[in-house]
Amino acid sequence: MLGQELVTKQAKDGILCQKLYLMERVYMRREMYLSLMMDRGSGGPLLVGSAQGGTSIEDVAAKNPDAILGVPIDITVGLTGENCDQMVAHLGLEGETGEKAADLMKHMYDMFLKCDCTQLEVNPIAETPDGDVLVCDAKVNFDPNAEFRQGEIFSRRDHSQEDPREVEASKYDLNYIGLDGNIGCMVNGAGLAMSTMDIIQLKGGSPANFLDVGGGATESQVQKAFELLNDDANVKAILVNIFGGIMRCDVIAAGIINAAKNIGMNKPLVIRLQGTNVEQAKALIEDCDFKMILANDLDDAAAKAVGVADIAKQAEELQLGISFN
């Protein structure tokens, strides 16, 4: 496995395996599934278990949803003995083995709270031939908002296993998620970013990323956002969609212009601005030395972005040197 691409449902393109964890072989009588997670439906932690472990819980849920039990936990009370007994019975454990499983659940809940987890998944939990209960594999997610409390945990984060674009964006407090399309998006506000991606798809295009610069973006953040988009070989056009209700359009415009000057913007750029200081922003763009396509509304902007992306892609395939600036 070491040095090979590990392909999973979460990483269909594969991630390079750089480390191996070696453990003692466990002889299992049977395998079970157990997890704790934050649940919106119950408004608190949820204890989830299944007697069918050692396989993808999503597959179990699809084939036999009754095999999975969810036990809501009252956050003001904590995990009770009754909660544990209910789950132990569902897992089909009895006697001393059931008591060990209940103790494990209590330890899991303590860790869940202490470490600010959003998910603590054990798959499988093994029942051994001598009646012991062992944790054989686990996946843990931590609340990023609790990083200031969990410094030791977050210091172990292995950025080499992550998208380098997302790692770089996080250094500048930019919310970036890479996708597989060819139209780069820069938007302020997560809801507006989602809407922008949807409209691009409705116009026949495909977004290359989710990028939310937030409501208080500075010129340096805007420049870094453009660097990420400009350096992405898959991006054929960039769509900027800014609503000046959370920040000034002229600040974004100045950031766009400075970015174009400093990094040598070479991708076609479609800009839709609306809100505070929009006229000043348009004047800045029109007076600059770079050709930028202004759009009146989001529908128009998406259509133009898809159009120029198609032209840029065709020109690249035909090896034509078309300059958009």
Image (spheres, rainbow, N blue to C red):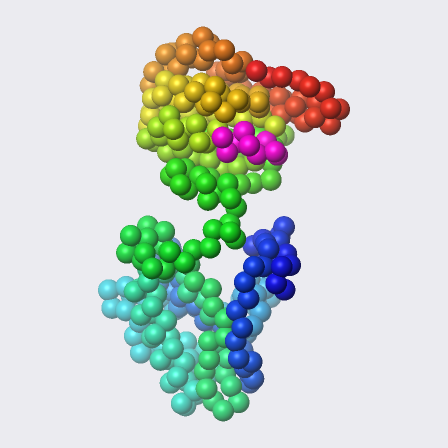
- The percent position of residue 236, horizontal first and vertical second, equals 61, 28
Write down the quadrant of residue 169 in the picture: top left
Q: Is residue 199 visible?
A: no
Q: In this rendering, is residue 247 above or below 97?
A: above
Q: Residue at x 40, y 90 (%)?
A: 96
- The percent position of residue 237, horizontal first and vertical second, equals 58, 26
Span colored in magenta: 227-235
Residue furthest out toward the left: 76
* Viewer-closest of 163 and 59: 163
- The percent position of residue 47, horizontal first and vertical second, equals 39, 68
Q: Residue at x 47, y 68 (%)?
A: 138
- Residue 97 vs residue 149: left or right? right
Q: Residue at x 63, y 64 (%)?
A: 1
Residue furthest out toward the right: 318
Is 285 part of what is drawn in magenta?
no
Q: Is residue 29 visible?
A: yes
